[in-house]
Image (cartoon, grey):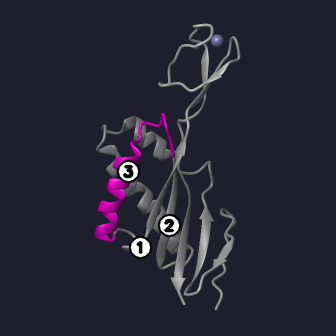
Amino acid sequence: MVNTVESPLFPCPLILTQERYVTKVLFNKAKHKHLREIITEGVLRMHEMSLMLEIIKIVSENARLHGFSKVDKIDVIVGDLSNVLPAALELAFFHFRKQGLGILDENTELDIIREPAKAKCQTCLVEFIPDYRLTLCPMCGLPNCLLISGETFRIESYEGSDEL
Ligand SMILES: [Zn+2]
């Protein structure tokens, strides 16, 4: 039996494995903006726990909606200037995985995709790697810099499956 997924929200390429039909579900970029809001409101370092809790909740709910009984892998993008510590996020994931939260089990994986920080000076147009969100241009010394990347924090995709 083929587990096909029809969703207007997510493109779902089917991947066939030996024991299961695994489906990768890509998350809509515009959705889950509130994950970023949790960061800005969040209590430092404890917030990786609440962020991970939220991620598992969102993914599990979505996976159930698609008829999956299990989440195999979750891909999360973490920007270098997103105020999220990848190690702390991973630790939180292991903690909740052990608890069997949502529809995770002991084989569910977490893949953290790092997004490097990049900024561009609006005056002399030089591109550089900033250490902070607010920074001075290393070329002209002016504070007229725009952050191009590194602030992202979102769920990129997940893979769900169903026993055959
Ligand atoms: Zn400059």
Q: Is residue 136 above or below residue 63?
A: above
Which of the 4 quarters of the picture holds residue 18? Answer: bottom right
> In the image, what residue occupies the spot 39% across and 42% down?
85
Q: Earlier in the sequence, mark 3 or mark 2?
A: 2
Task: Please provide percent x and percent y for residue 66.
Answer: 57, 74
The disc label shown at residue 89, or none: 3
Q: Is residue 48 left or right of residue 121?
A: left
Task: Please provide percent x and percent y for residue 21.
Answer: 60, 82
Q: Main secondary structure of the magenta part?
A: helix
Residue 156 shows in this picture = yes
The disc labelled 2 sits on which kind of residue? Lys
Q: Earlier in the sequence, mark 2 or mark 1?
A: 2
Label 2: which residue? Answer: 73
Which of the 4 quarters of the picture holds residue 40? Answer: top left
> In the image, what residue occupies the spot 63% across and 55% down?
28
Please tell me whether mark 3 sits on a helix, a strand or a loop.
helix
Task: Please provide percent x and percent y for residue 137.
Answer: 58, 14
Label 1: which residue? Answer: 107
The disc labelled 1 sits on which kind of residue? Asn
Q: Are marks 2 and 1 in contact (CB under 8 Å)?
A: no
Q: Nearer the viewer, residue 9 or 115?
A: 115
What's the magenta region? 78-100
